């Protein structure tokens, strides 16, 4: 009953389709980030730290040595290519490793080193001599749980005494068999079953509980309830750690229930800006002329990497096919692709194997636009009512940091309505968007 109910709810939650037919699934988005992320994101904002006890000294570390890790773990960290703690790790690691244990709520965008931080904390926390589960970590999906597990396995390469088990669908054991692995990572439903129904884990012996991707977790009602039900069985003095990429009110309310007396670490994402972008528009008499205008941009497409946004999957596919026919090396990102396929396309594009990426809106997140010097809005970003979608516009072409590389944005205008959208965008951002003639591209120099 429980499991089925959860599947139904999940379907409902993820059914929110956008106008272009691609559903935005936060768990998939998060997985995509993980699959394509190779290094820490750049974020020059100040880390905010709110201590549970503001009078106690604030510990932060600049090196991994200062953490006095077991040599096996320090070796594992360096073996992953980490030289020094990331910005949030500087504060989060000493808090998570402190004695007596302290609770933590940490919020920072994807790619800031949260997973690496709590993986290290878990490995450091457990006693390898004790052959029972001491650390429990839950993540919203099967794939996300696997990703975290891989980090733990990698980091623990030289610490074979500590073992890891996955509480995910498909992993089955006989009822009553107790796990010997010190760390268990899984999804809420299976973890709950393993604690209650199958008794593979004694929740009373858990001394560290990690809840990752809290924002994605609570997007599914079933997961929220299961998280509470797991949480309720843990000892009162169990160390609670909660991580989230975003922090709306709903995440806060959830976090406060799961993590009593928390220390809080926050790193706001860097604002995107249009300051380093030159914005243009091209007037086309009708939709068909947009393709001709795009081809006239050919000169630009060959020197730079370009991203082209379309409104629908069909339009994106059509455009990619036609550009290919014109001799361009084109990659296509489309909503029907699996996350793994999307990650592979993004990776090839990032490696420069293709110069042009054609995509619909929701597929494009996670691509670092800093490397893309030309963004073409083949279709302008609009909301359901056909008004300018400023946030999406900023997201497509905006860059972080005032000294980011220069870029160009070209908007295709094919009707009075789309001209109106351009004006709305100009007004909203208070930045001029200049008309160009694609048969005379001198203005873009
Ligand atoms: P998050 O969980 O916040 O998304 P991750 O822990 O997955 O972030 O880290 C993002 C990327 O940065 C990963 O590729 C990870 O291997 C790498 N990374 C994490 N911590 C460090 C560090 N201290 N030094 C260098 N790279 C790191």
Image (tube, helix red, strand yellow):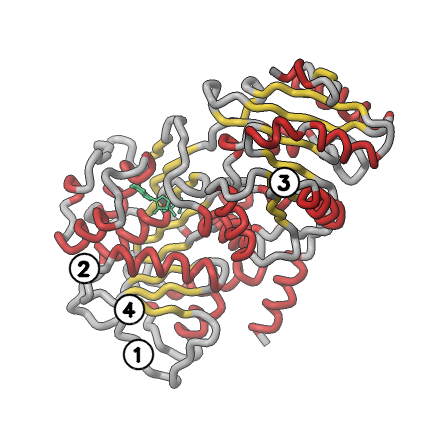
The span from disc 1 to disc 2 (Cα, nearest Å) is 25 Å
Image quadrant in which you'd find residue 248: top right
* Label 1 or label 3, whichever comes before in sequence order: 1
Q: Quadrant of ligand 1?
A: top left
What mark, if any, has residue 328 been given in the picture?
3
Instruction: Give 123 or 40, whichever is nearer the viewer.
Output: 40
What secondary structure is marked by label 3?
A: loop
* Residue at 81% over, 37% down: 385
* Label 2 or label 4, whichever comes before in sequence order: 4
Residue hosting label 4: 133
What secondary structure is marked by label 4?
A: loop
The span from disc 3 to disc 4 (Cα, nearest Å) is 55 Å
* Label 1 or label 2, whichever comes before in sequence order: 2
What mark, if any, has residue 178 been given in the picture?
1
* Label 1 or label 4, whichever comes before in sequence order: 4
What mark, if any, has residue 158 been given in the picture?
2
* Label 3 or label 4, whichever comes before in sequence order: 4
Image quadrant in which you'd find residue 177: bottom left
Residue 56's x, y, as percent? 23, 34
């Amino acid at each position: 009953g429980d499991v089925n109910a959860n599947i139904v709810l999940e379907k409902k939650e993820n059914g929110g389709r956008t106008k272009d037919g691609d559903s935005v699934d936060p768990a998939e988005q998060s997985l995509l980030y993980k699959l394509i992320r190779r290094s820490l994101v750049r974020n020059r904002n100040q880390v905010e730290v709110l201590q549970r006890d503001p009078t106690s000294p604030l510990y932060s570390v600049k090196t991994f040595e200062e953490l006095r890790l077991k040599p096996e773990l320090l070796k594992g960290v360096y073996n992953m290519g980490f030289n020094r703690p990331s910005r949030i790790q500087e504060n989060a690691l000493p808090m998570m490793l402190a004695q007596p244990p302290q609770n933590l709520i940490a919020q920072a965008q994807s790619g800031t080193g949260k997973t690496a931080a709590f993986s290290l904390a878990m490995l450091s926390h457990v006693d390898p001599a004790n052959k029972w589960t001491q650390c429990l970590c839950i993540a919203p999906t099967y794939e996300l749980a696997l990703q975290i597990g891989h980090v733990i396995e990698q980091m623990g390469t030289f610490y074979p005494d500590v073992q890891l088990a996955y509480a995910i669908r498909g992993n089955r054991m006989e009822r009553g068999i107790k796990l010997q692995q010190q760390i268990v990572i899984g999804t809420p439903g299976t973890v709950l079953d393993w604690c209650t129904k199958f008794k593979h884990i004694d929740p009373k012996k858990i001394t560290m509980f990690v809840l990752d991707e809290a924002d994605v977790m609570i997007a599914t009602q079933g997961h929220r309830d299961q998280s509470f039900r797991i949480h309720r069985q843990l000892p009162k003095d169990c160390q609670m750690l909660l991580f989230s990429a975003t922090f709306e009110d709903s995440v806060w309310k959830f976090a406060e229930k799961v993590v009593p007396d928390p220390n809080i670490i926050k790193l706001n994402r860097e604002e995107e800006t249009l300051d380093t972008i030159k914005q243009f528009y091209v007037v086309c008499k009708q939709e068909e002329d947009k393709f001709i205008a795009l081809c006239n941009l050919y000169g630009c497409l060959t020197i730079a990497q370009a991203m082209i946004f379309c409104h629908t999957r069909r339009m994106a596919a059509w455009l990619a096919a036609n550009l290919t026919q014109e001799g361009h090396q084109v990659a296509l990102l489309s909503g029907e692709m699996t996350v793994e396929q999307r990650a592979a396309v993004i990776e090839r594009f990032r490696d420069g194997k293709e110069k042009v990426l054609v995509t619909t809106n929701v597929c494009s997140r996670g691509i670092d636009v800093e490397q893309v010097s030309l963004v073409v809005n083949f279709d302008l970003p609009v909301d359901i009512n056909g008004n300018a979608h400023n946030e999406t516009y900023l997201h497509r072409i905006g860059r972080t940091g005032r000294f980011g590389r220069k870029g160009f944005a070209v908007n295709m205008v094919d009707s009075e309505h789309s001209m109106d959208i351009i004006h709305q965008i100009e007004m909203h951002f208070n930045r001029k968007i200049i008309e160009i003639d694609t048969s005379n591209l001198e203005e873009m120099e």
